[in-house]
Amino acid sequence: MRDIRLRHYSIVVCLLLLAGCANRGIGPQGGPKDEAPPKVLKETPENGTLNYHGKRVEIVFNEYLQLDDVSKNVLISPPQQHPPEVKAVGKKISLVFEEPLRDSMTYTIDFGNAIGDFHEKNILKGYTLSFSTCDVIDSLEVNGYIVNAEDLNPISGIIIGIHENTDDTAFSKIPFTRVGKTDANGHFYVKNIREADYRIYALDDVSRDYVYQPGEGLAFTEEIIHPYCHTEVEPDTVWKEVPDTIRTTITDTLETGVRDSLVIEPTIRREVDTIKYDTYTYFEPNDLILWFFKEDKTRQYFQRCFREKQHFFRLQFAAPQDSMPTVRALRPSEVDSTKSDSAWVDWTQYALLQVNERKDSIIYWLTDSVVIKQDSLYMEMTYMKSDSLYNLVPQTDTVIAVYRAPRISEKAKALMEKRKKPPVLAINSNASGKFDVYADFTLTFPTPVKEVELDSLHLFQKIDTVYHPLKFKIEPVDSAYLRYRIVFPWKPEMQYELRIDSAAFRDVYGVVNNVGKHQMMLKSLEEYSTLTVKLTNYNERARLQLLDKSEKIVKELPASPAGTKFEYIGPNTYYLRLYIDENGDGKWTTGDWATHRQPEPVYYFPSKLPLRAGWEFEEDFDYMAVPQLDSKPQELLKDVAGQKK
């Protein structure tokens, strides 16, 4: 019997073991996920240490660490021209200064989002360590916001610096006295400041030298700030809970009469226990707003010459040209000469010019057959170029436009000649079955047009099934004659047709068009919305911008005393932005450090505008009623990376 019981016991144990092996996922799995950031166990020197002159800082934590993007996250104030070495080994962070510590100075090390644990990457946010090289820790601070001046979005990751040297030239000559950095909401602190007068700046410090360089984004104020602190004694009420009862009388109507019942319910009420007074310290100024902008100072220089086709070449510049360059061509007969001054002629004798909308690219359409056949064109160009201080100065360069024909075998060339068809001048138009009543009807050509036969163009209006001829005008849109506009007072809901005879257009190379026609149907006025905006505080320099959901400008108009009227607007949700055109140039103007010009102020209508087809809307806009910083609708707010807030 004993052996039987032992065998039975062994079988049970084996079955239990097998069940345990088959169910490894059941039971304790190591506890909840670690979501706690690393904790500081020891600091050398300790936070708040006085008279410290060492070169090394060590911080020990309770778990293994990793550092993320030290150069971006770790900020040391006062700023260092030679960044210290920052490393994480095991559970310890070490920082070694490359520069001697300055006397009578408070040092602050802000680790930002650099410190995280090794396994879960939980970030220790907002950890700073401060110490002093003298017998006092400077304790004043200033804070505020950095806002993009053009669209009122917060700007993150921007250096905020103060200068104890209040001369304007300090910003571009010497590093900041102390620095801070904006968070994702554009908020900043500059801490551990001594009492003195300062100027404050924001800087997108691309060069990482804490000194303004032309081309870097910036913000500044004209006011000198004087940090200070003050204490306030404020009451703090302590409440206590007291048992109580609620007495309720319920009236019942019965067949025999009316009866009242008293219901008593227990409850808890709050009453004042004690009032104590606490002392709070406030640092000022704490509401600074700096309007961040990028100057309109792109470095101007000539990039290169392109000649993709034999009959034109393109001059490309790094920035828009305020004035057209002067380009002289070497006469075809003088290519091999000594290139004397008499050998050069103005390029307009041999080409038509086409300037793009940005004015940073100029195409020269060659019109002389002898010039076109040359593989290399020699030119002398004088244009405005930026010097080291972004001032424009005249520059003269020799330019060669080289055309390299594609390599084709003789057999392929013969086959192409055999299949070659006479060239045709293609005509494209913007005609459509849903044509906007306010749009221009345009014709676009691939090459400059030299001649237009008006008698070969016929415009009709279709009424029922009958086409009625119309009188109209045609005019060039650009200086290179690549686009033409058909001028006629178009009517909503009407159908039009433009018929073009063959050879109605001839380009500069003698190529003509084939027969064609272009039809369009104009939209109904019922398909549009109308919005009238009346300014409560009218400003004759105000300009209004109607924006879509991505803040793209749909239409811009100057403010009118009777109300600014946006007509022919497609039904959709829109937003409204206003800026004060202080210089009267009809566009928003950014700031300029050299002249101490702030960017033109911008305001938003605080609500979205859902516009419906066939409706006319009126809105009163008091752009002074809401604080400028709070005027932008929340759904439009984005941070510096373009992410919605």
Image: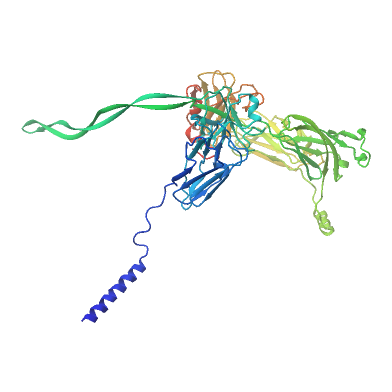
Q: Give how far across and how far down residue 517 sits, in percent.
A: 69, 40
Going by the picture, which residue comes out furthest to the left?
256
> Which of these two is toward me, 214 or 613?
214
> Which of these two is toward me, 103 or 23?
103
For the N terminus, the quadrant is bottom left
Which image quarter: residue 487? top right
Left-right relation of 618 to 85: left
Which image quarter: residue 430? top right
Left-right relation of 580 to 314: left
Q: Give how far across and how far down residue 255 sits, in percent.
A: 7, 33
> Which of these two is toward me, 354 or 2?
2
Left-right relation of 365 to 197: right
Q: Give how far across and how far down residue 579 sits, in percent.
A: 57, 25
Residue at 72% x, 37% y is: 318
Q: How many marks?
A: 0
Q: Give how far across and how far down residue 10 sits, in percent.
A: 28, 76
Vertical relation: 628 (above or below) 305:
above
> Which of these two is toward me, 138 or 368?
138
Q: Is residue 149 visible?
A: no
Residue at 14% x, 33% y is: 264
Left-right relation of 4 to 325: left
The colour mode here is rainbow
Q: Is residue 564 visible?
A: yes
